[in-house]
Amino acid sequence: MSNSVTKSIYDIPVTDIHGKEQKLDKYKDKVLLIVNTASKCGFTPQYKGLEAVYKKMHARGLDVLGFPCNQFGAQEPGSEDEIESFCEVNYGVTFPLFAKVDVNGGDAAPLFQYLKKARPGVLGSEAIKWNFTKFLVDRHGNVIERYAPNVEPEAITGDIEKLL
């Protein structure tokens, strides 16, 4: 783990669901909703809401980024191929999905370390509590808000609107 300070969310390396490394700078000037997802969770039907919000607002500059995570009740046991196919088949997901990551602990993905530090949760705790925690990032890479897993994607559209 390098000690270099991440100056911007756009410097953070991520791996897409097909194993291809990229930086988030391809999403510069976009509003981002970044979500840790899972296929076997009580909140999994939120994929439908996330896709609806993405379809409705993508043309105006919103991207939804899904990061599967198996850290909560082992609710994302599948391989990347299985996850991708599950999302497409069951929820018609077309927004970008990424390789499975850890969001908590020593092996937490750099992106989630950054998001948690920028926007701690209840009582200042940085730890992500469960699947489908959502982070809203403005067009300049500032982490604006953190939403609990039970907050439906549709309930966030007003906040997204303000940033578009």
Image (cartoon, rainbow, N blue to C red):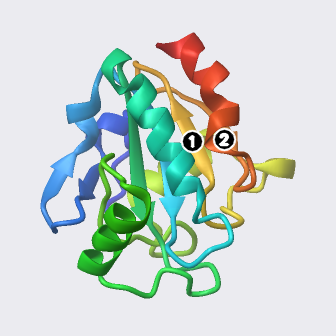
Residue holding disc 2: 146
| Quarter of the image where the N terminus is located | bottom left
The quadrant where residue 97 appears: bottom left
Residue holding disc 1: 135
Amino acid at the residue labelled 1: Phe
Q: Residues within 10 Å of mark 1 (few under 14, many from 20)?
A: many
Question: At which x and y percent is residue 125?
Answer: 77, 56
- Residue drawn at point x = 63 percent, y = 54 percent: 133
- Residue drawn at point x = 59 percent, y = 12 percent: 162
SS class of the residue under badge 2? strand
In the image, is residue 36 above or below residue 32?
below
SS class of the residue under badge 1? strand
Q: Nearer the viewer, residue 15 or 9?
A: 15
Q: Residue 1: in sight, yes or no? A: no
* Dot 1 and dot 2 residues touching (CB under 8 Å): yes
Number of dots carrying numbers = 2
